[in-house]
Image (cartoon, coloured by chain):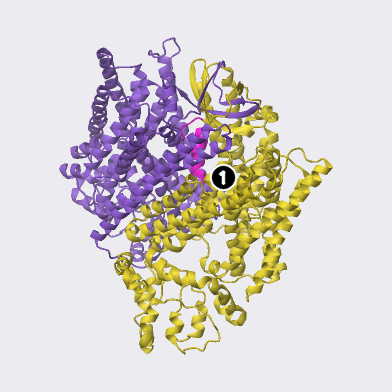
Chain colours: A yellow, B purple
Amino acid sequence: MVFKVSANSAWRVTRTLWLLMLVSLSVSICVCRASSIQEEDSAMENIVTEKKVEESHRQDSADLLIFIMLLTLTILTIWLFKHRRFRFLHETGLAMIYGVLVGVVLRYGIHVPRDISNTTMSCHVNARPATLLVNISGKFYEYTLKREIGANKVNDVQDNEMLRKVTFDPEVFFNILLPPIIFHAGYSLKRRHFFRNMGSILAYAFLGTVVSCFVIGLLMYGCVLLMKQVGQMGGDFFFTDCLFFGAILSATDPVTVLAIFNELQVDVDLYALLFGESVLNDAVAVILSSSIVAYQPQGDNSHTFEVMALLKSFGMFLGVFSGSFALGVATGVVTALVTKFTKLRDFPLLETALFFLMSWSTFLLAEACGFTGVVAVLFCGITQAHYTFNNLSPDSQDRTKQLFELLNFLAENFIFSYMGLALFTFQDHVFNPMFIVGAFVAVFLGRAANIYPLSLLLNLGRRNKIRSNFQHMMMFAGLRGAMTFALSIRDTATYARQMMFTTTLLVVFFTVWICGGGTTQMLSCQHIRVGVDSDQDNPMSITEGPERRSTKQESAWLFRIWYNFDHNYLKPILTHSGPPLTATLPPCCGPLARFLTSAQAYENECQLKDDDSDLILTDGDINLTYGDITVSTDASGSHTSSGPAFAGAATSDDLDRELTYGDHELVMRGTRLVLPMDDSEPPFTDPHHRLRM
Amino acid sequence: MVFKVSANSAWRVTRTLWLLMLVSLSVSICVCRASSIQEEDSAMENIVTEKKVEESHRQDSADLLIFIMLLTLTILTIWLFKHRRFRFLHETGLAMIYGVLVGVVLRYGIHVPRDISNTTMSCHVNARPATLLVNISGKFYEYTLKREIGANKVNDVQDNEMLRKVTFDPEVFFNILLPPIIFHAGYSLKRRHFFRNMGSILAYAFLGTVVSCFVIGLLMYGCVLLMKQVGQMGGDFFFTDCLFFGAILSATDPVTVLAIFNELQVDVDLYALLFGESVLNDAVAVILSSSIVAYQPQGDNSHTFEVMALLKSFGMFLGVFSGSFALGVATGVVTALVTKFTKLRDFPLLETALFFLMSWSTFLLAEACGFTGVVAVLFCGITQAHYTFNNLSPDSQDRTKQLFELLNFLAENFIFSYMGLALFTFQDHVFNPMFIVGAFVAVFLGRAANIYPLSLLLNLGRRNKIRSNFQHMMMFAGLRGAMTFALSIRDTATYARQMMFTTTLLVVFFTVWICGGGTTQMLSCQHIRVGVDSDQDNPMSITEGPERRSTKQESAWLFRIWYNFDHNYLKPILTHSGPPLTATLPPCCGPLARFLTSAQAYENECQLKDDDSDLILTDGDINLTYGDITVSTDASGSHTSSGPAFAGAATSDDLDRELTYGDHELVMRGTRLVLPMDDSEPPFTDPHHRLRM
């Protein structure tokens, strides 16, 4: 079944296919146009009613079709790039380019005459109602509020129906497209390397993002003051606006860089640092920006400094973050319990559906409670990966991974192609060269203020230093993407917000194209090792000697308590792995422990291996230090392949070894915690102590 | 890794989980309520603006959460049912029950005060605009048209915000939830048995549905006339309304029955007849109903009979059906070509994404062109299954199947739980006992008028008769489901439509619960064979002798031309299987044939087996007639497993046989068409003729 067409002919055929796709794209655009014209014709008549709604639906379908075609085109092109190993352009960058092209066509290629059916009415209500009942010639119609329009834009709004139509409700990005992206990020976090660098990641994500936000905010405030001096500013721009701008520009999204890292198998620690930081700083940036928006002093001048309002904003940040975190984790835990205590695994379809619904309900629950759904979904994803994933049937494990991979792919490329489109179809752009230059400088300095000082501080604590070439790479990989865009498009009502939106788009374009495209050059320029197999990096680390082993020591202080708790209590409660609770809980909790421990956990007791292997930091070192025990843990954490293998292995050679070390046999069964904290400790002095800690 | 918890404890634990789910459900309802109350509070203030929109979003999240919780509950319960082998209630029936329960709670358990923020305005415009710009105290707001409200309902609308909120836009069902269901039906059609009974299926689906539509329409018209006499009718109800009612009630959806058939492995022919009919009659009913709505005579009285209008409606039926069919097939063909001529199969994610996007674009394209998206999607699904599926990588084959299986599951259960909810939360119900009784009688008689006379006619042509117990089973399995509901909820503006909607709901409930629940009883009552392995039914058929063989003869007349064309031209063009085009096309088309034939097709030439085995009607008979050749084709049509197996098999025993029949070895390689048309033909008279036809 090998498919043998020469690359050359594939290229030729693909060119044909492109043409075909372009034709279909232009067809879909023509359809849009045709239905617009029909719309106008029917508007001439008096009886419009149902036809109008129908036309509107056709128009919507055609608009969506443009995006589907764009994505299809992107997929085909990206296949070609992958096929030919072009790495200078990622699919997201490509989606943007196609988006820009279609945006240009829609903007300048098609002129749709003014839609005369919009009507401006005046009324005297003291608040804007969410629903409007309009009595038109004796019939009542229900209208729903869509948005506020600046008084000077009223005529523009009516101007180009076509452009208005391809503009989606900004909340779509936040409520439909971002959640699967963020969930997938959490669900696919490489946990072993993430936890190994947890301290540094948390520092970059929390401290770094706040620093970056304030640095960008202050620089932009300087820029804004300068612009006011020069007379370049056409509207209000307050300090809170600057800070908000700083917050949204602090959410990094190095999806392009990480894809290349993955392909080239770049150093896993660098990967973990970048990925972990980008995942968590999205969450920080979202809540930071909403806290800044919530900053409202009581006085007449709503943009002065006030301690109470600041504290309130800070309290809100903490409250919303911890609330979202708790909700996300809670849903993950519930899903883990449900999948543990039912035999849903016999029906992968039901299991996958439950997993999907529970994960989605996290988002809805968080939004309904006033927390941030996107953040809740992130922590839900991490929890699901850490606990629930182990309870799923192998079939469902594949299905859920593939499902969210697909959703992530589609949503991400949709957002990026929409970005390209928005550059030309968005109607309220405010291009201000001075502001844009200022923003680029600020983004650069903000990222620098995040990475370099923090790395310096972290290196004081880390013995496995974050070397300067890693720092430069992290600096370079500060791409802005979907989250920044979604945050900036949410509100484009005021002049300040419109200028921000325009500038944000340009920052995203620049970083994705230039920084994303230059990743391979940057990697070779910085002499960063590629081709590192993430599961094989331990043997290599032996050659590095002291530097390597200290990594574990560095991360252990933060980690030991958590790991103990997770392994002894959480894993046994939520999954089938780990030691039985009857062994770890105090005797007074006996009945509860028996209730919560699954039969499988007792079976697991006979195995040396559990599913935590991805959390055991020093797999390699076990081989090294206790050479003749060879606890060759499987780093992938795969539930299926490892189980039987170990059950089998326990019968032959391992049994002999267990008999040799007969007295600590029972201790080893639990595989409590294998973290050799101190390298100077002589081997085999006290096996009980070493293995039990 | 065997999970050993006794069924008893599983039951206990699940009960706990149920309680947990119920608690979370009530939490979500409380959240709804809380936000409604907050909404009211904030409405008291003068400055509502952003808070209002935010609250509305929270409310929406909470509403959606109710459905997610309902689905989760359904999944857990259905797991329990499957676990305990309860077959009297299908997941869709269960989803309805939970929907009804929550509907009762929402309706009677929660009182939400009148939302005072709705405002009624009067204006003098001669048409209703799609967009409204309202000048409120100097600021402009954009409002979009949502729906028309009957003058007498204006106060009701404002009455219960809660109920209004959980009512989705009816177009959601048609544009978001139905397409994946219908696509999945097409994609999972068991093609071998479908094509074997194609003639009968087409007869039931086209002729039968039209008959059923008119029988129900006429009976209902009689009922309506009677009601007018008695004075039971509170509004207009025209003959076209009756026909429309007939059309929507003619779409059968025996998902419950088919699930049981699948589980019990009921006779494959019966399964194919029922499934094929239900899939196709959905398409017929959709277009029939829209044609009936389009019937508009020119005269003053818009409900008289007029030949021109009738012809126009009929023309529209044909046009929309063939247009939708052509579009669906076209997109399928394009996808097949793209997957054939690119090496996308190296990247399953891209391949799956492309497949998904192309299938979705069918729907959008059809809707944008004014055809019916749901119908286009159905034929796209069938085309994708028949051609594209063979080009996909094994990984993508699994992914696409699982993806659409999941989407189908979620959408279907969502619709059914919404149906349950709508019984109590829909605000314009018109319960008219006389109409309801009339509808039940009409549905019963309409189904009878479809099945029995048509079966009689078909049995004249079929030698493998549709026996009376099969007919009774088909009669019994005329469940109404998602399509009927989606069609009836689309327009509930008039009195007639509201009465139809209410009655439709009751018909769906009754058929799903009573007919669906009684399937196993009915099967045993009608002595219908269960436990038939669909791939093993041929050996059994040998005992049936002449009756069996005649089936092929019966279906062959319709089928031979299509099969020849498909196998010799379409399959080679669109997939890697089948004979190379260079062999089937006339020599003048040489260059084109070489261009379109993939390298793999030439390789395939060396294999006895191709992917068409699912279309070869008489696998068993080959074994029977040419007993010593044993072309044991794999009925599943699996691309992966069968290939190597045959490559291997060709080396041992089969090779000897091929040597024995050395002279027709080359002919057999192509596996052209193995349809022994006439049983009386003596074996081995002319192998060339027999095998090549």
Residue B673, can we see it? no
| Residue B624 location (% of width, % of height) | 25, 54
Per the image, label 1 sits on a secondary structure element best described as helix
Q: Give the farthest residue toward the right.
A: A230
Nearest the viewer among B653 and B419 is: B419
Range of magenta residues: B357-376
Q: Residue at x 54, y 73 (%)?
A: A557
| Residue B199 location (% of width, % of height) | 32, 37
**What residue would you read off at disc 1?**
A173
Residue A446, can we see it? yes
The quarter of the picture where residue B497 lies is top left
Q: Residue at x 44, y 81 (%)?
A: A691
Q: Horizontal placement of A555 versus A563: left or right?
A: right
Nearest the viewer among A68 and A585 is: A585
| Residue B229 location (% of width, % of height) | 26, 12
Nearest the viewer among A170 and A6 is: A170
